[in-house]
Image: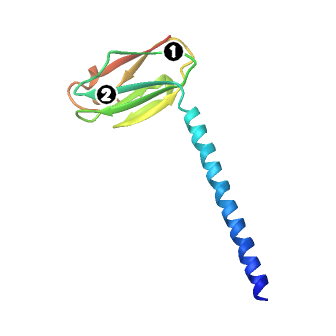
Amino acid sequence: MKKSLLTLITVGLIVFLTACGGGENSDDTVQNEAADGNEGQVITMTASNFEFDQAEYTVSKGEPVTINFTTEEGMHGIGIDEFGVKIQGDGSATFTPEEPGEYVIYCNIACGTGHSQMKSTLIVQ
Ligand SMILES: [Cu+2]
């Protein structure tokens, strides 16, 4: 009676340890997939009162673009209507431009007297 109970515990322990090992392996797989998903073009944009850090940002068509946006002064956001980009305050957005052209990047928060001049151009080539 005692011996069979011990066997049961031993078998249970082995199954438990094996299950844990399997869990670690699937975590590794997820990390690798996430690293692959990071490919693409990254634009770092910052805003102050009342301008963006560059007048033009150039990207290539057909590849994902990620915009990382931060506000250094005041409260700003960015909108690019053609790509459905809407960031308010710090944030990021990813989209894939397919058509070459020039697209307006504008501040989408009524931030003050210079708000209407807060525009830059996204050039897709
Ligand atoms: Cu604004």
Left or right placement of residue 17 versus residue 95 in this view: right
Along the polypeptide, which appears first: circle 1 or circle 2? Answer: 2
| Element type where label 2 sits in the image | strand
Q: Residue at x 35, y 37 (%)?
A: 90
Q: Residue at x 37, y 29 (%)?
A: 78
Residue 57 horizontal side relative to residue 25, left or right: left
**As displayed, is residue 88 above or below residue 11?**
above
Note whether 25 is above or below 10 in the view shown.
above
Relative image position of residue 98 (x, y in whole percent): 57, 17
**36 relative to 15 in the view: left or right:** left
Residue projecting furthest to the left:
113
**Residue in the foreground of this view, choosing between 21 and 48:** 21
Q: Can residue 109 be seen in this snapshot?
A: no
Q: Amino acid at mark 2?
A: Thr
Residue found 72% across the figure and 72% down from its top:
12
Q: Residue furthest bottom?
A: 1
User: Residue 60, which numbered label?
Assistant: 1
Discs 1, 2 touching: Cβ within 8 Å: no
In which quadrant will I find the N terminus?
bottom right
Q: Nearer the viewer, residue 35 or 114?
A: 35
